[in-house]
Amino acid sequence: MDIISRELIMQRWNVIQHELIPELRGDVGTLTPKLEKVIHILEWVRVEEFTGPGWCGVGRHPHERAWLANAFVAKAILGLDATTDLIERLTMDRALRRICGFAKCKKLPSESTFSRAFDEFAEGKLGERVHEALIKEHLGDELIGHLSRDGTAIEARERPKRAEAETAVVTAQPDLLPAETKTVASTPETPAPTKKRGRPRHGEKRAPAKESPIQRQRQQTLVQMMAEIPTDCDRGTKCNAQGYKVSWNGYKLHLDTADCGVPVSALLSSASMHDSRAAIPLSLISAERVTSLYDAMDAAYCSSELHEHCRSLGHIPLIDHNPRGGEKEEFEPADAIRYNERTVAERSNARLKDEFGGKTVRVKGGTKVMGHLMFGILALSADQLMRLRQ
């Protein structure tokens, strides 16, 4: 589906290619194809418009946050692993330093300055705000055929958070206890009553069945849903495309991807959270940004509640049936062809990891990990928009 005007994309491409890049070549010399890609993506995302004001006239002049934000986007495009690699590349590459906006005559910021700026960007959700504006500007007025929803593993270099252990009662030796406490006998704890099997007797009242997370989400607002989503580092296990179980230590990134390969919305959770718990929040976020017709999801999202939720938004759910030990229900021929569009989600996950830093997470904490991934998602979104010119 042609969801965006090719003429507008070509117009923007020609302005950058034939006006901005020749001017930079005259200033810094030869530009490699990778640096030209950095220029195009930075001009598409315009991250400097969201970094806020700089120096206010009191104290020492801080380093311009817009330049540092451009540097972090370039880091994702160039595939640099660590901040030290970015600083070394900026020190050696005069063209990249000029592209990001750093002055020629001034010394580059230190590593601690880059780290403090990254903390500010992650806490202020800079990447999320820029990505939302990018999607609304270029896809907000278009009709999208399919939104493909999927979760992918994000490996992190941090210890998984342990579950909160129950407070244990410390028993002291009788010789070390005070005289007044020796006579106090410890009362044994009564075990919790086990749940009875079968139907309840006449007049017997039992506790109601536990409400599923998806049922609870359908009665909540988006803010309440996001507050309940866990974002701590832990262990996760899921089946890969070949059907084998894989485990990892870290997080899980959930993406809604349009037919053109542009990620529309993103959400980060703990690695152990089931994919279906991110379906309703993602669908609400995507519905605020774009207009779509079909929601394509794999068997992990098979649920009657999710079918009803998609229809309540005016979408047609295309969810692969999970037999759960029963007989599998196949798609209708037309729906099976449409469901094949979901492969765009796999390609987006692969490109994010292989080309835009999804595999090189060196920060700790859900907020910083999401900030790191959003710079890559920004670069991926702009790159996919530019590919629509072909």
Image: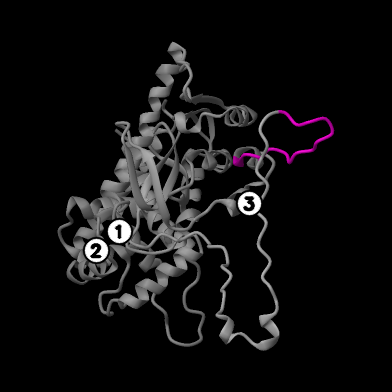
Farthest residue to the left: give it.
30
The earlier-in-sequence mark between 1 and 2 is 1
Residue type (three-letter) at the residue carrying disc 3: Val
Q: Residue at x 41, y 27 (%)?
A: 2
Residue type (three-letter) at the residue carrying disc 2: Leu
Cα separation between marks 1 and 2 = 8 Å
Q: Which residue is mark 2?
A: 96
Res 283 → quadrant: top right
Snapshot colouring: one colour
Give the structural element (helix, strand or loop) at label 1: helix
Residue 388 seen from this side:
no
Q: Is residue 123 left or right of residue 36?
A: right
Span highlighted in magenta in the image: 199-213
Q: Residue at x 46, y 63 (%)?
A: 122
Residue 208 falls within the magenta-colored stretch: yes
Numbered disc in front, either 3 or 2: 3
Q: Which residue is mark 1?
A: 74
Percent coordinates x, y for residue 74 in the rendering: 30, 58
The earlier-in-sequence mark between 3 and 1 is 1
Percent coordinates x, y for residue 320 in the rendering: 46, 24
Cα separation between marks 3 and 1 = 32 Å
In this view, the residue in front, 306 or 164, is 164
Q: Which residue is mark 3?
A: 223
The earlier-in-sequence mark between 3 and 2 is 2
- In this picture, is 211 found above or below 120? above
